[in-house]
Image (cartoon, helix red, strand yellow):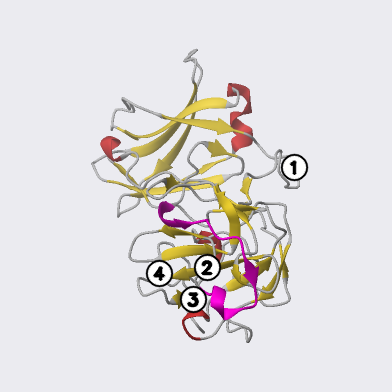
Amino acid sequence: MKAWLCLALLAGCAHPEKCALRLPFQSGEARLVIQGNDGAFSHTGRYRYAWDFRMPVGTAVTAAANGVVAEVIDQFAEGRPDHALDERANLVVIDHGGARFSVYQHLSPGGALVAEGETVTRGEPIARSGNSGFTSEPHLHFAVIDHRNRSQPACFANVAGDGVPRQGQLVRPRAIVLPPSTLPRDTFSENGIALESDVPARRFTAPLTLRGRATRSARRVVAVFLPRARDGRKQTFFGDLDAEARFSIAVDPAALAELGPALDFVLALEAADGTYRFDFSVPVVVRALPAGGGSSSAPTTRSR
């Protein structure tokens, strides 16, 4: 299987949803791929890994990834299928580092919305589409290129499947669900605890098991949940240590409901006399899901 370059940054990527490259037009828009990779009309040789998206003149063109504008040409007005116009296409080139660039071509005269040397972010409008240069109809030519202007295999995180648009395909940027963050494994290292399981950072919605290892001598490990207002209430869960000083603590968000949704959470070591102490905690929001699963709110998505 070909390892498609996904600008993440620019290493082979088996999971396009993790990559930085996005379709170069705004979310909600559907565009026909009138020529894809290895297209017979003009995507051969150094241009083989390019795409042409049908696009009315004046459509907003967006940056496919973060970078710095390396080149802007926007003074040409003519456009037709004539090789005399090969070098008379308006374009914007963005530098993404590592001698890799994205090129946006056949733009409107005066259609550049950015200047050379300007920093741009993924999804930011950078130009207006057009029909300049060697072209058969209004469209956007897009490719990832190297320092010798050779197109490179690429894929888009917001295109379903392998992320590679095909000729004749109508593509629309799909929503990308952002996975929730997890706590770093050393979050509670100051308390003598190393996490060994993924623990949600900030938002608890489902029962979970806290697993880890005590790095100092202790009787057992305690998980403490307290209201942020520190009103004297708390809920504790304990985990015994095995021969390798590992522990496992089951936590059900439903058991924390009486404390309220905005809590502080900490893992600490319990001493032989039954006491424990900690100097910091991490904020969490506890939202127990309804019985039978489902979500109390939609996941966060990004489509650009």
Q: Is residue 164 above or below residue 269?
A: below
Residue, disc 2? 88
Q: Nearer the viewer, mark 4 or mark 2?
A: 2
| Disc 2 and disc 1 in contact, CB within 8 angstroms | no
Earlier along the polypeptide chain: callout 3 or callout 1? 3
Q: CA distance from mark 3 to mark 2?
A: 25 Å
Q: Amino acid at mark 1?
A: Ala
Q: Foreground mark, 3 or 1?
A: 3
**Which one is earlier in the sequence, the residue at label 4 or at label 2?**
4
Residue stretch in magenta:
67-86
The kind of residue on which mark 3 rests is Pro
The residue labelled by disc 1 is 291
The residues tagged by marks 2 and 1 sit, at their Cα atoms, a distance apart of 63 Å
In the image, 139: left or right of 83?
right
Residue 157 position (above or below residue 147): above
Mark 4, residue position? 11
Kind of residue at disc 2: Arg
Q: Which mark is residue 153?
A: 3
Place residue 296 in its image quadrant.
top right
Q: Position of residue 289 (x, y in %)?
A: 69, 40
Secondary element under disc 3, as helix, strand or loop, is loop
| Label 4 to label 2: alpha-carbon separation | 32 Å
Q: Which mark is residue 197?
A: none
x 72%, y 55%: residue: 29
Q: Earlier in the sequence, mark 3 or mark 4?
A: 4
Q: Are marks 3 and 2 in contact (CB under 8 Å)?
A: no
- Is residue 257 highlighted in magenta? no
Return the x and y of residue 269 as percentages of the image width and height.
Answer: 32, 35
| Other residues around mark 4 within 10 Å, as few (<14) / some (14–19) / many (≥20) | few
Judging from the image, what secondary structure is the residue with disc 2 in?
loop
Q: Does 123 appear above or below 86?
A: above
